Image (cartoon, grey):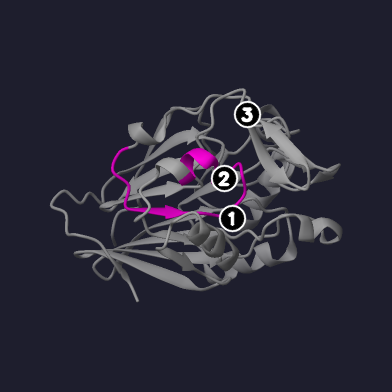
């Protein structure tokens, strides 16, 4: 069943905007929808619990707080982990917001008072409708850790956001989520080619001596597999557990044979994007 939103008079399909709050937290505004991803708003110097006795210190101040956000229609959450849905988000976000995520996260969100969670398995989709505009969020395969430590981390999903104007497909946006490189990534371009924009989680997060998110070099390899027109790296410097910064990714991108254009954002930056013209 689709999530129905009130109609809006000012739907713009000619241009969209990505606002980078920090870590994996962004606001995507396009086609009449305002989507908040992986909300985390702890201040620099504060610590987040990652489970199994592991903590991470936030190193970079987020660009804004919950009260500063524009109106938000829904949340797309890659997984329920302290650096992606933190105590500030749990306390200050509207508890009536629809949240599209996986089953593990929906169960934890319910315990925090969020009862509009929509759980997706890999390749399942959820439609969000606003008048003539439609957003389809599809769960993409993700793998947060090598097999020998997989049970120590929550399950993760990537997300494909497809925006429609009536029956016309206008824009395709892929969010990797906290994944490592793995074989199932190759299935994504087979089923979802022609990605316009990819938000790529990097950072080389290291927990208990194991790398559990893509390094900069691996993030570029992921872009080569997916083949988007444009890629925006995020999740690269916010927490003390990150071991692979943006400079490593930029160096790998400079050596890549991919035709993708890499666009780099700092906290508080706004990146405006345009879809290909309708044919």
**Label 2 close to label 1 by CB (< 8 Å):** yes
Report the front residue among 71 and 257. Answer: 71
Instruction: Please give the residue where the numbered disc 3 appears in the rendered image.
Output: 58
Residue 194 visible in this rendered orientation of the protein: no
Q: Which comes before the other along the chain, label 2 or label 1?
A: 1
Q: Mark 3 or mark 1: which comes first in sequence?
A: 3
> Based on the displayed image, in which of its 4 quarters is residue 50 positioned?
top right
Residue most toward the bottom?
1
| Residue 85 place in picture, x, y as percent | 54, 46
31 left or right of 158? left
- With respect to residue 22, does 190 lie above or below? below
- Position of residue 165 in the picture relative to residue 79 (left or right): left
The kind of secondary structure the magenta stretch mainly shows is loop
Whether residue 265 sits left or right of residue 135 in the image: it is: right
What range of the chain is rendered magenta?
70-90
Residue found 77% across the figure and 55% down from its top: 152
Label at residue 84: 2
- Counting from the top left corner in percent of width and height, residue 115 is at 41, 62
Where in the figure is residue 79, as x and y percent of width and height?
A: 59, 55
Q: Where residue 105 sits: x, y (%)?
A: 56, 60
Q: CA distance from mark 3 to mark 1?
A: 18 Å
For mark 1, does the 10 Å Cα neighbourhood hold few (<14), some (14 to 19), or many (20 or more) residues?
many
Q: Which residue is mark 1?
A: 79
Compared to residue 229, the image places residue 250 above or below, namely above
Q: Earlier in the sequence, mark 2 or mark 3?
A: 3
**Residue 154 is covered by the magenta coloring:** no
Q: Quadrant of the N terminus?
A: bottom left
Q: CA distance from mark 2 to mark 3?
A: 12 Å
Q: Residue at x 39, y 45 (%)?
A: 93
Question: Secondary structure beneath disc 3?
Answer: loop
Q: Nearer the viewer, residue 92 or 162?
A: 92
């Amino acid at each position: 069943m689709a999530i129905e939103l009130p109609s809006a008079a000012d739907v713009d399909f000619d241009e969209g905007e990505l606002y980078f709050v920090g870590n994996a937290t962004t606001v995507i505004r396009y086609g009449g929808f305002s989507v908040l991803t992986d909300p985390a708003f702890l201040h620099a110097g504060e610590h987040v619990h990652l489970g199994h006795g592991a903590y991470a210190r936030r190193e970079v101040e987020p660009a804004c707080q919950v009260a500063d956000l524009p109106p938000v229609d829904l949340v797309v959450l890659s997984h329920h982990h302290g650096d992606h849905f933190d105590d500030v988000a749990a306390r200050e976000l509207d508890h009536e917001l629809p949240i599209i995520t996986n089953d593990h996260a929906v169960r934890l969100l319910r315990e925090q008072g969020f009862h509009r969670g929509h759980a997706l398995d890999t390749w399942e989709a959820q439609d969000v409708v606003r008048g003539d505009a439609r957003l389809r969020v599809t769960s993409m395969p993700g793998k947060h850790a090598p097999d020998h430590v997989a049970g120590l981390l929550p399950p993760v999903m990537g997300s494909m956001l497809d925006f429609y104007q009536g029956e016309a497909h206008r824009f395709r946006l892929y969010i990797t989520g906290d994944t490592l490189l793995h074989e199932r990534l190759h299935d994504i371009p087979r089923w979802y080619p022609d990605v316009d924009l990819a938000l790529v989680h990097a950072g080389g997060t290291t927990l208990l001596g194991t790398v559990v998110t893509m390094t900069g070099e691996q993030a570029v390899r992921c872009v080569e597999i997916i083949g988007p027109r444009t890629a925006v790296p995020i999740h690269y410097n916010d927490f003390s557990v990150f071991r692979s910064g943006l400079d490593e990714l930029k160096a790998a991108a400079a050596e890549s044979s991919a035709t993708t254009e890499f666009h780099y954002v700092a906290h508080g930056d706004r990146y405006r994007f345009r879809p290909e013209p309708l044919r």
